[in-house]
Image (cartoon, grey):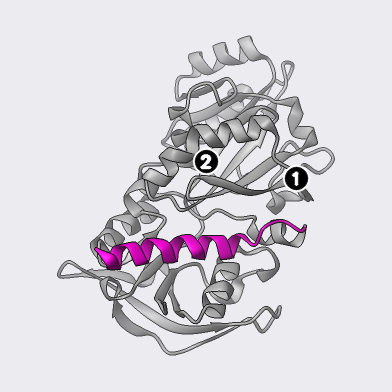
Amino acid sequence: MRLTVAIQMDPIEALSIKGDSTFALALEAQARGHRIGYYLPRELSLRDGRPIAKLRGLSVRDQEGDHYTAQAPVATDLAEVDVVLMRQDPPFDMAYITATHLLEHALPDALIVNDPAHVRNAPEKLFVTHFPGLMPPTLISSDAHEIRAFRAEHRDIILKPLFGNGGAGVFRLREDDENLGSLLETFTQLYREPIVVQAYLPEVRAGDKRIILVEGEAVGAINRVPAKGEARSNMHVGGRPEPAELTDRDREICAAIGPELKARGLVFVGIDVIGRYLTEINVTSPTGIREIKRFGGADIAALIWDAIETRVAARKAR
């Protein structure tokens, strides 16, 4: 099976390929003989109901600083390709949401990974709330009174923007911290959306585990340990990756959410687990597959392409 693949992504020249999951997916697609191309989100248009992208033919190589060759862009109807990978990074803003609407016009002719409607309806910090009993104590609110009451109950808390990413705008407030009022004012000025407030989990000092699921099944994990003096474990802000194994609790969490992920067409998902708690379900542009393979784990890019090829074959057999 030779597929035509369009990747909607951020500028390829700016990728740090050592840890980039999109690049790993492109490498694996190319190794399988699929024809790959890419375009930027702003190069996606809807013309008379047809999703048109300026697609550049692409070849990739695992060589830092010389990792790709791209052809001249060609206006391409995405309904005429086999697979579209929606892989640009958040923020999950109106531009991102609009792209999901435009990509829906390529359905059902193209397989889109992940399904754009379900990506749109599964913001990372909101989708997780549909699985009761898995999250730490959490409040999502713009009401300062409710936020102060939550803090009075839990004392040590985390504040973060509802649609933030990469650890940006995440604050820890201990019981004696006097900055809550100022932070609420700042959040109100910067964001129109409610704030996410969670009980601080001391287990984060041992790491924030990223677990990858393919078609709803857990296939690998990596632990991200915060730097000294830092409450955030994101590798963007100095978190240290370490190999990780799945615990019984991790498997329990994956079993609870996996069937729903698969049913929604969310082929490639990354979840974040701290201690015994699920904190986020990442469906927009999950990362971590190169680190997992580097530590001796599964070749998740291959597993993702196995799943994609299976879905495409099933579509063509209808």
| Quarter of the figure that contains the N terminus | bottom left
Q: In which quarter of the image is residue 13?
A: bottom right
Is 27 on the left or on the right of 8, as rendered? Answer: right
Q: Which mark is residue 281?
A: 2
Location of residue 24 with respect to 189 vertically, above or below: below
In what element is the residue under mark 2?
A: strand
Location of residue 221 with respect to 202 vertically, above or below: below
Residue at image point 53% right, 35% down: 255
Location of residue 104 with respect to 52 vertically, above or below: above
Residue 118, horizontal then vertical, whole percent: 36, 46
Residue at image point 58% right, 64% down: 301
Is 193 on the left or on the right of 172, as rendered? Answer: left
Please rate how many residues cluster around mark 1, counting C-alpha atoms within 10 Å: few if below 14, some from 14 to 19, many from 20. some
The one of 201 and 177 positioned closer to us in this rendering: 201
Residue at image point 38% right, 80% down: 55
Q: Which mark is residue 1?
A: none
Please, what is the dominant secondary structure of the magenta stretch? Answer: helix
Residue 306 highlighted magenta (yes or no): yes
Please rate how many residues cluster around mark 2, counting C-alpha atoms within 10 Å: few if below 14, some from 14 to 19, many from 20. many
Location of residue 229 with respect to 179 vertically, above or below: below
